[in-house]
Amino acid sequence: MLVNFRPAWQAALTGMFLIAFWALLMLIPVPGFGSGVLTPEGNAAAYIDHIVLGSFSYGLNTWFLSYLGFASSVLLGVLAGEFLAGSASAQKKVGGLIGAGCALVALGLVWSIWCPIIKLLWTSSFVLVTGGLSAIVMGIFYLLIDVLGFGDGLSFTVIGMNALAVYMATMLFDFRHIGHIFVGSLAPRIGVGRRTGSFDRIRCRMADPAVDVQNKDIREDLRLSVRETACVGNERTGPVVSSAGARAVNSMSL
């Protein structure tokens, strides 16, 4: 229904949704935490989800209050699409998308001083920054493909017309193996251990009281993960990280 409103109303509703969402996150008191807390356990969005969904709450992702953020992202996309479909010249469309995107990013970064950029909550500042970056990228690709004629844009057309299918595919299939082929070698260079995935799984298992933490295989794998992470950190940050990693390894050897 909102997509049938005039662009001015859509923009106004987007602003109202973002401000209302921010106010609710800041003002709703959470038992044991108070109001204005944005930690995973103490934020108002997770609290409302727990009241409504109970044990069916979906991890750290939030839904009911975050719908205001979701709707805002959708409306930003609708506004961008309507602008592209309008009668403005190609030059104005490129300039308008990139200019609006830069403005949204700047506004989102300023707002993040009071409303942090948090994807799991889909906060108002996150909506503005990601919406702005998307507008900039859209303007660049519109310039390259539609205006200058580089490429036919077929791959973007296929993905754009099957967005839900692509989203579901990421839930059903693990594409990290494909990504590792192309960018896996970059992980150690940015401080991510090659065994981070296994480390996270082992850490979750050891946090479960039902798991025997004396299992030698698990403990040895964890020691190797920490040792490797400490070595990677030592290349970036010096002996402080290395000594911390060494203490962790030694403590697990006891």
Image (cartoon, grey):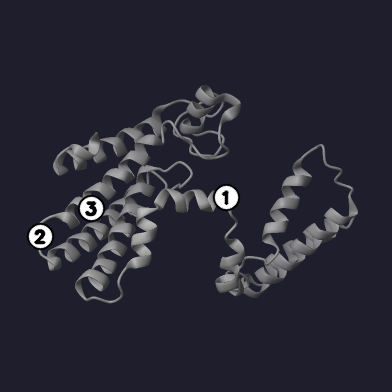
Q: CA distance from mark 3 to mark 1?
A: 29 Å
Left/right placement of residue 129 relative to residue 172 reads left
1 or 245: nearer the viewer? 1
Q: What residue would you read off at disc 3?
A: 81
86 or 105: nearer the viewer? 86
Residue 251 badge: none
Identify the residue at horizontal 59%, vertical 72% (top origin).
Answer: 181
Dot placed on the residue nearer the N-terminal end, 2 or 1: 2
Q: Are marks 2 and 3 in contact (CB under 8 Å)?
A: no
Q: CA distance from mark 2 to mark 1?
A: 41 Å
- Of the residues shown, which amino acid type is indicated by label 1? Leu
Identify the residue at horizontal 19%, vertical 72% (top origin).
Answer: 147
Left/right placement of residue 209 relative to residue 32 reads right
Left/right placement of residue 192 relative to residue 242 reads left
- Of the residues shown, which amino acid type is indicated by label 2? Ala
Identify the residue at horizontal 42%, vertical 26% (top origin).
Answer: 28
156 or 72: nearer the viewer? 156
Residue 76, how many percent across, how many down? 27, 48
Residue 251, how many percent across, how many down? 84, 56
Q: What residue would you read off at disc 1?
A: 172
Identify the residue at horizontal 84%, vertical 55% (top origin).
Answer: 219
- The answer to whether residue 112 shows anywhere in this view is no
Q: Is residue 74 above or below residue 99?
A: above
Dot placed on the residue nearer the N-terminal end, 2 or 3: 3
Q: What residue would you read off at disc 2?
A: 88
53 or 104: nearer the viewer? 53
The secondary structure type at the circle numbered 3 is helix
Quadrant of the rendering where the N terminus is positioned: top left
Crowd band around label 1 with a 10 angstrom C-alpha radius: few (<14), some (14–19), many (20+): few
The secondary structure type at the circle numbered 2 is loop
